[in-house]
């Protein structure tokens, strides 16, 4: 039944996508983040719905009458440079065949990032994209929060198998990045029932993050929570709500959860934590040997650990977005990756500052601030998790660019002087009264 539902929805959307290609971005985001096909057990579980939607979207773009233009800002230009650098590092990868396979996956993600930049060009479409991301990942937040409460926190919250967010660490990161988007929608909501629904979803999602039992997610949750209070409007009310939720959540979790979280302070005695540190040393040593291009994709393998790791027998994944990029694309790749995040952060600050004094542009200020909170959550939690090529992060970068463009457009419209009236003969009308320099009649 689930297979049929997903198939009917996707196939039924294809004519709409061909007519309005921006719907393809919405459908692709739903398939990519919620992964509804992975919740089925039949033919739909492995069917390439995302590829089908992407092909329909690109076909629709060829025939659409709208302007086909990518907004080129410092973020989008730098992203192109970063993609090109990843292609260069792949050409010289130490495991070339596996690197080419991974590059293909990354390029598909980046293709949809630039299609998003091309199509989601106004407030309505931007908010539709925020809604679909928040609902898709919020589904697992609400579901995971309820699961954690009904099981007493005795089990890990996980995402759908075979996806970017399948593990407890991965779903924890995704939910941390989603809570600020829920907060944005909460600030914009007008109906009381919608506000209460979004508030409940945020609370359950925070419980689900705790329920992942991921230490990296706990660090990311603390950073995201502090940033959320700092950056949001009506922060005092949020603090009154968020504080009790976190306190109750901490007290609710079982003793095994507290014992696991306590190992953050005693990481020297934790084998998993020391394995990550060994992996980080490996990436640094590898980058020192190949400082420009690194080893290319698929670098964290036993043969390379034998050459560069302090403990060659303790082979781990990168477990950090920073060391992942460093090991695979060298110091140049890491510099581009960090600069992209910094540019996005600064653009959000500028957009929020420009929009805040104007009530009609408050949505820009709110969204820019909440995008910053999501970026901070990714930066903090990602320090302990290897998701450097997570499509959600690059969709956030696209949203930053779109918000920046909206802010600039509205600011330019506000300062354009009104053109003086012109007579049919092309001459300016003769001024009288005060306008002509004579005193007004009393």
Image (cartoon, rainbow, N blue to C red):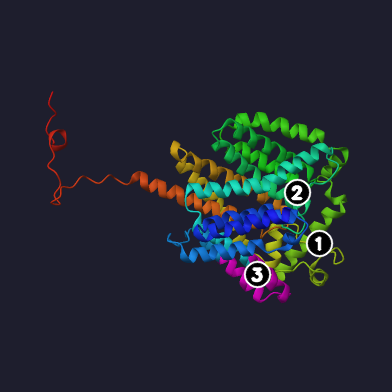
Identified at 62% across, 67% down, the residue is 107
Q: Which residue is mark 1?
A: 316
Decide if residue 7 is on the left or right side of residue 406: right
Image quarter for residue 12? bottom right
Distance from label 3 to label 1 (Cα)?
A: 23 Å
The mark that comes first in sequence, 2 or 1, is 2
Q: Which comes before the other along the chain, label 3 or label 2?
A: 3
What is the x, y in percent for residue 22? 52, 56
- Which of the pair 89/119 is nearer the observer? 119
In the image, taking residue 380 as reference, residue 57 lies left or right, namely left
Of the residues under marks 3 and 1, which one precedes in the sequence?
Answer: 3
Query: Can you identify the residue that label 3 sits on?
Result: 104
The answer to which quarter of the image holds residue 289 is bottom right
Marks 1 and 3: in contact by CB < 8 Å? Answer: no
Q: Main secondary structure of the magenta part?
A: helix
Q: Residue at x 77, y 35 (%)?
A: 249
């Amino acid at each position: 039944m689930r297979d049929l539902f997903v198939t009917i929805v996707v196939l039924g959307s294809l004519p709409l996508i061909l007519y309005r290609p921006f719907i393809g971005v919405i459908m692709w985001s739903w398939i990519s983040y919620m992964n509804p096909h992975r919740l089925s057990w039949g033919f739909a579980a492995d069917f390439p719905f995302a590829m089908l939607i992407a092909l329909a979207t690109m076909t629709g773009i060829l025939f659409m009458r709208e302007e086909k233009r990518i907004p080129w800002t410092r973020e989008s230009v730098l992203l192109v440079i970063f993609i090109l650098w990843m292609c260069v590092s792949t050409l010289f990868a130490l495991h070339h065949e596996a690197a080419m396979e991974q590059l293909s996956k990354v390029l598909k993600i980046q293709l949809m990032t630039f299609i998003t930049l091309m199509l989601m060009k106004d407030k309505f479409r931007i908010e539709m994209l925020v809604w679909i991301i928040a609902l898709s990942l919020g589904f697992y937040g609400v579901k995971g929060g309820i699961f954690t409460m009904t099981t007493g926190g005795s089990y890990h919250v996980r995402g759908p198998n075979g996806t970017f967010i399948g593990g407890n660490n991965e779903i924890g990161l995704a939910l941390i990045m989603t809570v600020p988007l829920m907060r944005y929608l909460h600030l914009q909501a007008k109906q009381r029932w919608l506000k209460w629904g979004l508030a409940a979803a945020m609370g359950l999602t925070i419980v689900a993050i705790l329920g992942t039992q991921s230490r990296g997610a706990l660090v990311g949750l603390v950073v995201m929570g502090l940033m959320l209070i700092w950056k949001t409007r009506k922060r005092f009310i949020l603090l009154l709500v968020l504080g009790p939720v976190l306190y109750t959540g901490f007290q609710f979790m079982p003793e095994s959860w507290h014992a696991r979280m306590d190992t953050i302070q005693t990481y020297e005695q934790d084998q998993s934590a020391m394995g990550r540190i060994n992996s980080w040393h490996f990436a640094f040593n590898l980058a020192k040997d190949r400082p420009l291009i690194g080893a290319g994709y698929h670098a964290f393998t036993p043969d390379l650990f034998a050459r560069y790791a302090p403990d060659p027998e303790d082979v781990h994944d990168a477990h950090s977005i920073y060391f992942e990029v460093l090991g695979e694309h060298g110091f140049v790749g890491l510099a581009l990756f960090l600069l992209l995040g910094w540019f996005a952060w600064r653009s959000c600050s500028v957009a929020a500052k420009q929009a805040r004094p104007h009530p009609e542009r408050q949505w820009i200020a709110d969204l820019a601030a909440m995008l910053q909170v999501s970026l901070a959550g990714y930066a903090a939690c990602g320090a302990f998790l290897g998701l450097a090529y997570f499509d959600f992060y690059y969709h956030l970068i696209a949203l930053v660019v779109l918000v920046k463009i909206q802010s600039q457009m509205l600011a330019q419209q506000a300062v354009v002087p009104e053109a003086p009236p012109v007579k049919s003969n092309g001459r300016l009308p003769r001024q009288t009264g005060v306008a002509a320099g004579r005193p007004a009649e009393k």
